Amino acid sequence: MFLLGALTSCATPEVKGVIQMSSSRIVLQQAPDDGAYSVPIGESKNIPLPDVKSARIEGAWAIGRHQLVLITTTSKECARAETLLSVTDENALLQPLGKCEERFTITSGADQLTARQNDARDPSIWTFLHGSLNGPVLLSVLNARRPRGSGPVAGAEHAADPTVPPAVSQPVGDDVVPAPVGAGPLPRGPQRSPRLF
């Protein structure tokens, strides 16, 4: 009986997912005895996922010096919830992304991650910028903040606003070099000589 208890207490957690990032290995695992989920990060950190019945890694991104992992969980209270794990060399932080049952489309750039709520008339927007998760901000509020005539793409004036999704492309400015003269399309058909008389 003692031997059986010793063997069960040494049981190895079941690995549910592994992400190898540039500076750390992030594992999603489930304990064999009570079924509790946790996220060991490297050798020194272990983040518990309390009251979770199941969990799955959905994606991973490197944003600046932060490594982000999106984890989908189910629990007694919620059939589907999104959680964003942010990892640096110094710490790790789990933050809920949205409310129960909300789903998101994720886009990322070099220094910002944006999560836009799916299937909503006025979707909520979350942004991860400069090491912090900000939101939710409704898309209608973001559009109201933009100056008239700026269109759907955020201009340079929103670069410091963490609630504005990243622009699709940089605005074209004075630094664009025009094509040389004569570089346009070739004329169609044979050319006639101009009449002098």
Image (cartoon, rainbow, N blue to C red):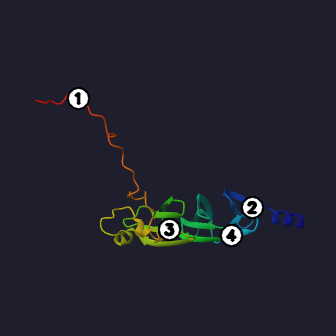
Spot the residue most to the front.
196
Q: Nearer the viewer, residue 163 or 135?
A: 163
Residue type for callout 1:
Gln
Instruction: Say which of marks 4 and 2 sits in front.
Output: 4
| Residue hosting label 2 | 13
Q: CA–CA distance between discs 3 and 2?
A: 33 Å
Numbered circle sitting on residue 191: 1
Please tell me how crowded label 1 is: few (under 14), some (14-19), or many (20+) other residues with Cα within 10 Å.
Answer: few
Q: Secondary structure at mark 4?
A: strand
Mark 4 and mark 2 residues within 8 Å of each other at the beta carbon: no
The quadrant of the rendering that contains the N terminus is bottom right
Q: CA–CA distance between discs 1 and 3?
A: 57 Å
In the picture, measured across the screen, residue 125 lies left or right of residue 50, that is left
| Residue hosting label 4 | 47
Residue type for callout 2:
Pro
Of mark 1 and mark 4, the one earlier in the sequence is: 4
Of mark 2 and mark 1, the one earlier in the sequence is: 2
| Residue hosting label 3 | 127
Name the residue rendered at 30%, 65% in the picture.
149
Of mark 1 and mark 3, the one earlier in the sequence is: 3
Instruction: Say which of marks 3 and 4 sits in front.
Output: 3
Determine which quarter of the picture holds residue 86. bottom right
